[in-house]
Image (tube, rainbow, N blue to C red):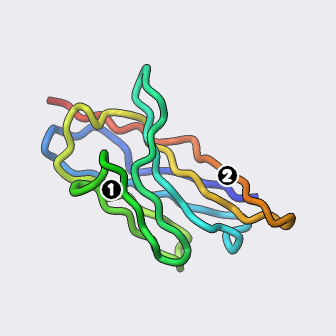
Amino acid sequence: QVQLVESGGGLVQAGGSLSLSCAASGSTSSILAIAWYRQAPGKQRELLAEIRTSGNIIYTNSAKGRFTISRDGAKNTVYLHMNSLNPEDTARYYCDAEVQTSFGSTQNYWGQGTQVTVSS
């Protein structure tokens, strides 16, 4: 099993920056990828960025140009650096780990999320 703990959320003014952390523990050697998602009230959870153990990174349109995903392997931590925040970025931010199982399939684990609120 893998446990994920997000941190770094808070209240920021429009135009500001924030960096989120996702610390993984447990069977971290089985992690294939970690992704950041967010969910605003009344909306579906949306993917923002993903970083795979191979180093490949993807960004969705919501994150391109303003958000950067990175990792510190020694700390088993993945970060999401967010710039030029606007009130539409207000949401609860979650990280998700795709984990290889012993049966050859994959399983996903979620953290509890961290709240980001952007004031205008």
Instruction: Read off the residue under disc 2.
Output: 108
CA gap, disc 1 to disc 2? 23 Å
Residue 63 on image: x %, y %:
31, 51
Residue 11 on image: x %, y %:
28, 37
Instruction: Read off the residue under disc 1.
Output: 19
Please identify the residue farthest to the top as the structure is shown. 42
At x 43% / y 25%, what residue is drawn? 43
Residue 71 on image: x %, y %:
45, 71
**Image: 71 above or below 89:** below
Q: Amino acid at mark 1?
A: Ser
Please identify the residue farthest to the right as the structure is shown. 103
| Nearest the eye: 94 or 48 | 48
Under circle 2, the secondary element is strand
Under circle 1, the secondary element is strand
Pick the quarter of the image with the C terminus. Answer: top left
At x 25% / y 32%, what residue is drawn? 88
Q: Amino acid at mark 2?
A: Asn
In this rendering, would 31 be left or right of 119? right
In this rendering, would 26 be left or right of 104? left
Marks 1 and 2, the one that precedes in the sequence: 1
In this rendering, would 3 be left or right of 51? right
Pick the quarter of the image with the N terminus. Answer: bottom right
